[in-house]
Structures are given as C-alpha cells and as structure tokens.
Amino acid sequence: MSGAGLGWGKLIVLGEHAVVYGRPALAAALARGVRATATAAERSELEVPAWNARVTASREAPETRRGALSRALDAILSTYGGARPNVRIVADVELPAGGGLGCSAALGVAIVRAIDAHLGVARSDADVAAASLAWERVFHGNPSGVDSAVAARGGVFVFRRGDPEPEIEPVTPRARMLFVIGDSAEPSATKAMVAAVARHRERVPDKVDKVLDGMAALVQNARIAVMAGDLPQLGKLMDLGQALLNTLLVSTARLEEMCAAARHAGALGAKLTGAGGGGCMIALARDPEDAERIAHAIRSLGREAFIAEAGAS
Ligand code: PMV
C-alpha cells in the first residue's frame, strides 16, 4: 500500500526568535508546502527530485546537507519503535529551502503523514507535529516547534512552546491576509541564527530579554488586529517587529532593502520571516493590485517574489 502526506509551509507573522525563549509567536500556514508519498521498499530512502537528492536512512551519516537528510529520515523512522517500516519516500517540495518558510518542517510532517498513511496509522495533528520534531531537531538543534505545528495543523494561531505540549490558540482572521513573499536568495541557516541570538543574549541578557518582551507585546496586539481585520494596524506591528529583529542582529542589508522597496510600493508593513540572516521577507498587501505592485518592486531589485494568502488549512 502506498501513502500520501502533506505538510504546509508557514509564515511567522511576528515573534520569530522570541518564540525560542517561551514568548508567543503569530504563525500562519501558506497555501504551499510539501507533498510526500511512501511505498514499501527493501531499505528506507528519501528522494527529493527538486534538490536532485536521494539518500538512505542512516544514523551515522556525515555532517553534510545530504547526511542531515539521511539522519533526519532515520530519526523519524525510529519514532515508530518496533513497527519501524522500510519505505521509499518521494517528496515534492514547493518551498525554497533555507528560506524561512518552514520547508524542513513541512517536509518532516509530509513524511510522517505519508508513512502513517502507508501503515494505516491515524493520529492527531498534535501527534504528527510531535513525531516530526525528531526530524526538525537534526536540522535546527533547539526548535521551538512552531514550524512543525503550522506544517501539521494549517490555519493561523498564536503558538507558545511548552513541555510536553505547546500552547496553541487558534485565530480566525476577519480579513483576507495577502502577503508578498520576497526571497533574498541569501541562504539562511536557522540553527546558526538561533545560536547567534543565544550568544548575543549571553552577552547582554537584560537588553535582549526586553526586546523579546517587546516582541511578545507585538504578537498580542497583532492577534487582536487579525481578529478585527485591521490590516493597517497589523502592518504597523510588522514594521515594529522588523525594528526589534534588527536589534537582535538577524536582518541583512538586502532584507532591509527589500522591506524598504515593499513599503515604498504600498505595503502596509514588511519584515523578515523565520530565522533571518537571509532567507525570505514578507510584506502585507491591502489588496491584490497592491500585492502585484509590491511583488514588482521586489522583482525590480533582482529578487524573486510571489503572492500568497496566509492561513491555508
Ligand atoms: O527559519 P525557519 O523557517 O526555520 O524559522 C525559524 C523560527 C525561529 O523562531 C527563528 C526558530 C524556532 O525554532 O522557532
């Protein structure tokens, strides 16, 4: 029997990095993600045609990108305990890797769902997200779990990390949330960025904790703005969020340039999304015409941009 699974990509609208330290983050699923299929095989392997990658599951694989895929697949298979299957997974990836759009979490969730479907296992979104964390840990070291939660659940919610379960507060948007997503084409390594913020926090703990508290306040206000359909207010909060992320030293000159171009073209707000240090930025558009104008402004800088509605489920 073959099984199929889907994991959503995500936008962190506000609260990245702060969420690692127990503050809330506002996250939304993207109507793009990863689809995977699982079929019985002699030995477990993963193929990602978009990356020209084919790896066999192994706990001892080297510290390379492919090695990480191999170890992460092994980590997922180990969560099945005595029922550990031998499967061939093929994944169709619709998200840029290392772009801050939750590509690795979407891949992990799609793989877990495909294996579950292949084995005839049914479980909740929360359990799928928890199982896929074994995969995320290989790539991210200390993931907050927000990416995996969005990849499994879809929708829009406020997330707060917790042990053993995260707190998830679903948010129903009153207005359509159209985002322009611009890719800086600078590769961003979440693990390295999270470690850089941790080092910064060791140096100036009081200052960083104040910034993280400021981000938490923005998230609570953004939640209210989303529920009220107040897009201009949400945009202002995103701009403030970008200023705070800048003080954590996770933005880049190119991301700043892209955010400025988006605002100039009429964006209600713009910021980086995900770990930063490169990867993607997001700009909130008032309507589809504005979204086209903003995407055009970003493309004029030589960067790729696409328009997506947030909150897919
Ligand atoms: O870069 P991404 O898409 O993996 O997002 C990372 C979000 C962080 O808050 C920086 C890290 C985390 O684990 O939540």
Image (cartoon, grey):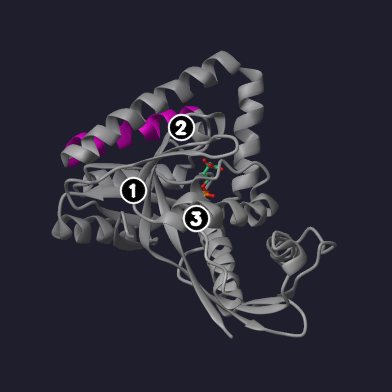
Q: Quadrant of residue 238?
A: top left
Report the residue at 40% width, 50% height from top: 11
Tell whether circle 1 marks a residue whose Cβ is less than 8 angstroms from ligand 1.
no
Q: Position of residue 14 (x, y in %)?
A: 38, 38
**Labels 3 & 1 near each other (Cβ < 8 A):** no
Residue 248: mark in rendering: none
CB within 8 Å, label 3 to label 2:
no
Disc 2 residue type (three-letter): Asn
Q: CA separation, marks 1 and 2?
A: 25 Å
> Reading the chain from its start, which is encountered first: label 3 or label 1?
3
In magenta, the rendered stretch is 231-247
Q: Position of residue 76 (x, y in %)?
A: 68, 62
Q: Position of residue 24 (x, y in %)?
A: 44, 32
Q: Which residue is mark 3?
A: 102
User: Could you tell me what secondary structure mostly forms the magenta stretch?
Assistant: helix
Q: Quadrant of residue 43?
A: bottom right
**Quick check: 151 left or right of 232?**
right
Q: Disc 2 marks which residue?
A: 246
Is the N terminus in the top left, top right, bottom left or bottom right quadrant? Answer: bottom right
Alpha carbon distance from label 3 to label 2: 21 Å
Q: Which residue is mark 1?
A: 156
User: Is residue 151 shown above or below 260?
Assistant: below
Q: Residue at x 18, y 47 (%)?
A: 266
Label 2 Cα neighbours within 10 Å, binned few <14 / some 14-19 / many ≥20: some
Kind of residue at badge 1: Val
**Residue lying farthest to the right in this orientation:** 60
Element type where label 1 sits in the image: strand
Where residue 272 sits, quadrant-wise, is top left
Task: Say which element carries label 3.
Answer: loop
Residues under numbered marks 1 and 2 in contact, where contact means CB atoms less than 8 Å apart: no
Taking the view exactly as shown, the residue that stands out farthest to the top is 206
- For label 1, the crowd category at 10 Å Cα-Cα, with few meaning under 14, some 14 to 19 and many 20 or more, is many
